[in-house]
Each structure stands twice: as C-alpha cells, then as structure tokens.
Image (cartoon, rainbow, N blue to C red):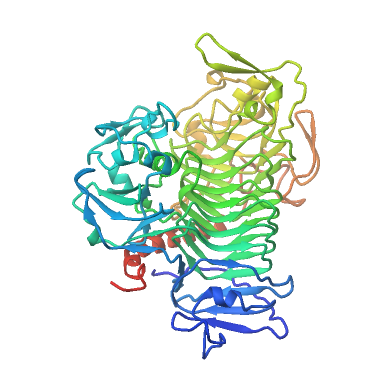
C-alpha cells in the first residue's frame, strides 16, 4: 500500500496498576507474556487480562479462533492492539487454523478441468490465494446431479425452491458448465450474461466428503494456494469493555461476533475480510462501537461489485451468485449485521459485498461511513429499527437505502435519515425501496386471503382491520440523491393502494432525481423537495401524480446544472449549492417544531437553530456556503482502502500459509 490510511487516534488514560502483555508468533504460552518473554497466542493473553490491561500483538500470522470471556470496566477497558507498518499496512493478521489443501487429483467422472481432494466436513469458506471463491450452497450441493449440465442457466435453476420437483441446478452440474455459459434472469432485463469471468473462472462444491474445484480456463490447483476454514474469528460472549484496534481478521464465517449480553465493546481501525458477516451484533448486545475500519467480502473478483445498468449486468450476476448460488436465498454476506441496542457505526469504509449494513437494531447511529459497490443494499433497516442514519456517503449500490419489513412487527420504529449523499451512476439503480409483506407477519390478521381465477393467492386489506399494526415513522430529510434511474427515486404508491391510507413517510428537504413515482398521496408528507432530471424535461402532465409539482420544486433539464457548483472532484460530483441555486430557500426549518401539509411535526435531530442562511433552509445535504471537504476526504479514504485490498490480493498468496511458499 502506497498511502497511509488516516484514522483519528483514540486516547485513553491508563488505569492505575494496569499491566501490559505481549504476543508474538515466536513466543510461548508458557511465558509470562512480558516484552522479553511474550505469549504465542492471543487466546492465552485473553485469559490473563484484567481491567485496564493492554495486550500488544506483534507482527505475524496468528491462526486462532478466540472466545473472549474476561471483561474490562467502563473506566478501565482491556485493549488488544495490533501492529501497523510505516505506511499504515496491517501487520497483525488473524485467521482460523483452517486447512491448506495440497493433495489434488483430477475428477474426470465429474467433468474436464475439475479437481478433487478429500475433505471430511463441508467448510464455511474456500479461499484461493487468500481470496474467497464461490462455494456452492449446501442445498444445491446435496441435490442428485442431472444427466447433463445445461448450456444456459435461467432464473429457476438459480433461485428455485429446494424440495420435491425442484428446478434448482445441482451443485455438481455447476462444475460441468461450459466456459461460455450465460445466465438469463428477470433481473437482467432481457440480457444474457456470462458467468465464469464474473466469478474469476473458478468455483468449488463440497459433496459427500469431497471438495471439488472447477476452472473454466487452463488453471490447476497446484498453481494456487487453496485453503478452507470454518467457524468464527473473535467471539465476545458476554464480555464487556474490550477494545480491538489495528487488527486484520480474515477467513472466518464471521470476523467479530458479539453475543449473549456483550456490552460496551469497540472495534476500531481494523481490516475485516471474508465471511457471511464482518461484524455480527446479536440481540441483547448493548453499546457496541464499530469505527474507522475497513470491511469487505474479499471476493476473488471484487471489481465486479458494481452498479448494474442496462448495458452491463455483471453486478447483477454477482448479486445472484452471492444470494442464490453461494447463499441459500437469504442475504448472508453483510458488512455489519446489527440487531443490538445502542450500536454506533462510525467512519467506516464498507465495500465490495452483498449488503453494507443490516442495521436492524434499536437506538442505532450510523454516521460518516462510506458504503460503496454493494451488489444488493447499501443500508438496510428492519422491523424494529430505531435510530439516526446521517452524513453517510452511499455510492453505486443496487439499492442504496432499503426500509425492510414495513409493518412486520409490533415494535416502536422511528428512523431519521439526514445529511446523506446517495450517489449512483447516471441511469443506474434506484434510491429508496420499501419492503412490505406484512400479510405474512404481525399484520396478517388484517388481511383477507383468496385464490383468484389463475390459482394465485391474493391478500386484500380489510376495510375495518381488527388489529392494525403501526408502521412506525420514517423521516427522510436534507439528503442529496444524485444520478440513478429515471423512475426509481422513492415510491410507496403500491402500499397506499394496499392499505387505502397515507403512510408514515415524511420525505422533504431533499434533492431527488426527477421521478414520476414520487407521489404525494402515499406519504404523510412529500415535499417540499427539489426534483431534477439529467436528460428529459418531464412536465407535470407527464407525471402519474400531477400534484407532485404543486408541493415540490421541479427543475427542468435545461436548468439542472444550476443546482450545484461545477468543480472537478476526485470521483464525486460537486454537490455544493451554486449561487442562485433553485435548492436555496426551498426547504422547511427542522430545528424547531413546524407545521407542514396540515401536520404538526416536532423538531428533528441533526440541526440546531440557525443552521441556514436566508428565509428558509436549502434542500439537500448542504446549506449555502457549506463545503464537501469531509465527504471528499471520506471518498479518498475509501479509494485508499480499495487500493489496499487490491494489493492484498496480490500479496496474500505468500502469507496465507504462514509466509511459506
């Protein structure tokens, strides 16, 4: 890595009588853990610490999976500190013991370019040269193979439900697919996309005690370093007041799992790679902080985690691969999976995976993060989410913001989304998606269920629902949405029709890509917003809801450039407001209680009185005269992180087996 990743230092006062322990690969767990006689393992140090102690972990590869049981105290945390190089590179590397695979034989009984090695149990991960490759999900791997592999893959082969009569493609048949096989799927809008290049021309399948690897090109296993791993990296089961800093964890199903009453723990300045979750915060866990870290899937072809567009669906292929071919259908690749209370996700770079944040906890704060190139969702909230999501830079994700499981639970749900930049490629991807299948959850009693003439089950909301579920409140204000598809900004019209009422979405003071589906009757409050378009000049007559232009300011295509300044920025559009911008004085003052659309709304988080100039606030994430300096710094840091990950891909082959070639 050429540039140092910059992190704000955290200064902690040393507790009286605190001890320092040292760990190096050349040490011994029979030692006392001093600088002169260090421990050999982190697990041994974790068993020796008391509140206020610090464990200094030297450079090297530690093949460990550690469960932390001892705790610090609020004013005397225990710190586990790794070692960084002069250029910021991570020198302390932790991965599971795993197994290096070096005894391969050809498997002509399966097909050409297929290799096999005995492996008693199915692993969680298969790594090639330290990077994750496709491992066919367990359900498909166990299906009896078809007599012949297809020449083309369709959606049912990828996504069909397992069970009698399934049309899912069996795992062993994936190993027989021709190098030029194409996938077709409703997601791809009629396109047929090549599979093998997107997955690095290699995939694996475990079946009945054998691991198979197939190359689409002339590759052979002995040309690479293959390893497998299972289980967790670091597990905090009830442990509290622990700080983990400057560590590189990789190769586990989950790098950090916080479980069973863990509280007030911090993960900072770490690099976390691989697994179904980089950090998993379970229910009942409180006060977790995840900050200034880099989280990525570490996939062999991470460059194809990109926004799918009409002329390039490779990002869509990876979405299907991760969710349906590697995964069983659930979203099992997540940067931060949060179901805890009081979790703070601050200043991280979360990139190149399926979902950035599954932020479904209570009293969550997610701020100043860069979330980019997630093939599914950037930020996802859930049925019982409450919290603040602000000043994040979300770039080129399949769905930047997904409000999941609307009306799925009887729980308080209040979300505040403000000050964020959502940046999509032009004509690629939407912005906000609301998911609702509440007829299958807590709201089910309020629906009538019928089978129509086509044999399909139809759910109709009752005119007088006996036990309606409150959907919560969603405040979306002072955000800037740039780019994206023409008609995919934010719509809940289908929900309004389902429930025959306005829904608790308060959407105002934003700058949105012009969208006919931004209706005014489906929300409690829709507007004022500033709507713009890049290429076409949609008029109110062309809208599904002409009232849109009555409550929002619509900027025609000819004036779009007048909204923002037009300075050249490194990879970002300049979204600061130009003098005379149509967004100036277009909003409502959220720092005090106000009335809009006949509704009384309390003062909202994030803005103090006097936060704007003039008679009214500007729409969007910036007020008049505000700069993008901090967002530019965030973006640059994310670029440095991507370069670091790219260099790791080149270098990991040498250290993935303890530096032995």
Does any portion of residue 70 appear in the rendered image?
Answer: yes
Q: Please, which residue is most extreme toward the top here?
A: 453
User: Relative to residue 17, is residue 403 depicted above or below?
Assistant: above
Instruction: Indicate the quadrant where residue 307 lies.
Output: top left
x, y percentage for residue 409? 70, 36
Q: Please, which residue is most extreme toward the bottom here?
A: 36
Horizontally, is 36 left or right of 341 in the view?
A: left
In front of the other: 390 or 123 = 123
Does any portion of residue 578 appear in the rendered image?
Answer: no
x, y percentage for residue 238? 67, 62
x, y percentage for residue 327? 45, 43
In front of the other: 271 or 131 = 131
x, y percentage for residue 528? 67, 33
User: Relative to residue 341, is residue 7 depicted above or below?
Assistant: below
Horizontally, is 582 left or right of 229 in the view?
A: right
Which quadrant of the rendered structure holds the N terminus?
bottom left
Labels in figure, total: 0
In front of the other: 9 or 185 = 185
Horizontally, is 513 left or right of 599 in the view?
A: left
User: Relative to residue 158, is residue 605 depicted above or below?
Assistant: below
Which quadrant of the rendered structure holds the C terminus?
bottom left
> Which residue: 34% across, 40% down?
171
User: Relative to residue 651, is residue 509 depicted above or below?
Assistant: above
In front of the other: 354 or 467 = 467
Instruction: Indicate the quadrant where residue 452 lies.
Output: top right
């Amino acid at each position: 890595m050429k540039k140092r990743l910059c992190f704000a230092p955290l200064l902690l006062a040393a507790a009286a009588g605190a001890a320092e322990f040292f760990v190096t690969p050349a040490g011994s767990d029979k030692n006392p853990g001093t600088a002169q006689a260090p421990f050999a393992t982190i697990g041994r140090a974790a068993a020796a610490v008391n509140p206020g102690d610090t464990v200094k972990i030297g450079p090297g590869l530690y093949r460990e999976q550690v469960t932390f049981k001892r705790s610090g105290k609020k004013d005397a945390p225990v710190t586990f500190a790794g070692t960084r190089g002069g250029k910021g590179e991570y020198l302390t590397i932790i991965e599971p013991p795993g197994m290096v695979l070096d005894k391969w034989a050809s498997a002509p009984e399966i097909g050409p370019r297929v290799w096999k090695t005995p492996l008693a149990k199915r692993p969680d991960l298969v790594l090639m040269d330290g990077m994750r490759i496709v491992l066919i999900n367990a359900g498909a791997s166990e299906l009896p193979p078809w007599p012949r592999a297809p020449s083309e893959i369709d959606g049912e082969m990828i996504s069909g439900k397992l069970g009698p009569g399934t049309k899912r493609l069996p795992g062993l048949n994936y190993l027989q697919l021709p190098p030029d096989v194409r996938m077709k799927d409703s997601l791809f809008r009629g396109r047929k996309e090549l599979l093998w290049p997107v997955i690095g021309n290699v995939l694996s399948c475990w079946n009945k005690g054998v691991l198979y690897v197939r190359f689409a090109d002339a590759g052979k296993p002995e040309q690479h370093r293959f390893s497998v791993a299972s289980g967790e990296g670091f597990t905090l089961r009830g442990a509290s007041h622990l700080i983990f800093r400057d560590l590189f964890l990789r190769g586990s199903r989950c790098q950090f799992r916080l479980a069973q009453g863990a509280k007030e723990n911090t993960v900072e300045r770490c690099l976390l790679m691989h697994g179904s979750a980089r950090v998993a915060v379970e229910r009942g866990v409180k006060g977790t902080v995840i900050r200034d870290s880099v989280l990525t899937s570490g996939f062999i072809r991470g460059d194809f985690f990109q926004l799918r567009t009409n002329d390039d669906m490779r990002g869509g292929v990876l979405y299907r691969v991760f969710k349906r071919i590697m995964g069983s259908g659930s979203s099992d690749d997540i940067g931060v999976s949060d179901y805890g209370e009081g979790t703070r996700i601050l200043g991280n770079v979360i990139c190149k995976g399926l979902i950035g944040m599954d932020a479904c906890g209570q009293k969550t704060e997610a701020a100043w993060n860069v979330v980019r190139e997630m093939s599914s969702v950037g930020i996802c909230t859930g049925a019982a989410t409450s919290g603040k999501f602000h000043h994040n830079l979300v770039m080129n994700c399949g769905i930047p913001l997904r409000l999941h499981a609307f009306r799925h639970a009887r729980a308080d749900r209040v979300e505040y989304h403000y000050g964020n930049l959502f940046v999509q490629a032009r004509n690629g991807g939407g912005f906000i998606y609301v998911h609702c299948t509440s007829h299958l959850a807590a709201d089910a009693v309020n629906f009538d269920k019928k089978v129509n003439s086509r044999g399909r089950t139809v759910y109709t909301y009752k005119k007088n629902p006996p036990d309606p579920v409150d959907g919560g409140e969603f405040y979306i204000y002072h955000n800037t949405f740039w780019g994206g598809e023409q008609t995919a900004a934010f719509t809940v019209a289908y929900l309004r029709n389902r429930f025959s009422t306005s829904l608790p979405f308060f959407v105002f003071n934003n700058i949105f890509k012009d969208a006919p589906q931004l209706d005014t009757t489906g929300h409690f409050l829709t507007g004022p917003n500033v709507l713009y378009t890049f290429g076409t000049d949609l008029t109110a007559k062309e809208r599904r809801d002409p009232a849109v232009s009555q409550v929002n300011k619509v900027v025609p295509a000819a004036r779009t450039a007048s909204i923002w300044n037009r300075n050249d920025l490194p990879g970002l559009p300049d979204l600061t407001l130009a003098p005379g911008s149509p967004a100036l004085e277009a909003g409502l003052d959220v720092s005090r209680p106000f009335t809009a659309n006949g509704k009384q709304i309390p003062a909202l988080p994030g803005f103090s009185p006097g936060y704007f100039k003039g008679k009214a606030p500007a729409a969007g994430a910036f007020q008049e005269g505000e700069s993008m300096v901090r967002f530019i710094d965030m973006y640059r840091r994310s670029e440095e992180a991507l370069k670091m990950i790219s260099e790791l891909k080149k270098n990991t082959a040498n250290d993935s087996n303890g530096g032995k070639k």
